[in-house]
Amino acid sequence: MKAIKAVVIVMGVLILAGMVALVYGMTRQFDRMRAPGKADVLGALSSPLPQDWQTRHLAVGDGRIVLEAQGPDGRAALFLYDLDSGKALGRIDLTP
C-alpha cells in the first residue's frame, strides 16, 4: 500500500511539473509572436504592374511574395518580390 501511495505522489509531481513546463513554453511562444518581425519592418512594396492589369492570386512563403496578375488582353504573368528588401525579383510571363 505504501508503494502505491509513493507512485501516486510521484505521478502527481510529474503531472504538475509537466503543466508548469507547458505554461512556461506557451508564454515564451506568445512573447516571440508579439516581438516585431519582418512584417513590421518591411514598409511598402513597390509593384511594377503594367497599367490596367489586375491581381488574381497572391502567395507568400520562404520570404517571398508571388503575385499573379492578368492584363486586359487576357495575358497573365507572375511577379516575384523579396520580403526582406521589398524589391521586385522578376516577372514570368505565362503563355497558354
Image (spheres, helix red, strand yellow):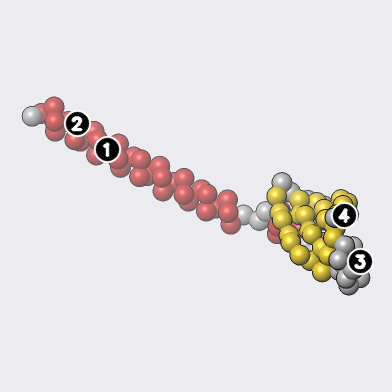
Which marked residue is nearer to the observer: mark 4 or mark 1? 4
Tell me the element at label 4: loop
Which marked residue is nearer to the observer: mark 2 or mark 4? 4
Q: Is residue 50 above or below residue 31?
A: below
The residue where tag 4 is placed is 95
Left or right, 9 with reference to 57:
left
Q: Position of residue 8 (x, y in %)?
A: 19, 35
Determine crowd level at label 2: few under 14, some 14-19, many 20+ residues with C-alpha closer than 10 A: few
For marks 4 and 1, the one nearer the N-term is 1
Q: Amino acid at mark 1?
A: Val
The residue where tag 1 is placed is 13
- Using the rendered view, name the quadrant where residue 12 is placed: top left
Residue at horizontal 85 percent and vertical 60 percent from the top: 76
For marks 4 and 3, the one nearer the N-term is 3
Q: Amino acid at mark 3?
A: Pro
Residue at horizontal 37 percent and vertical 44 percent from the top: 20
Q: Which mark is residue 50?
A: 3
- Per the model, the C-alpha gap separating discs 2 and 4 is 70 Å
The residue where tag 2 is placed is 7
In the rendered image, the quadrant that contains the C terminus is bottom right
- Per the model, the C-alpha gap separating discs 4 and 1 is 65 Å
Q: Amino acid at mark 4?
A: Thr
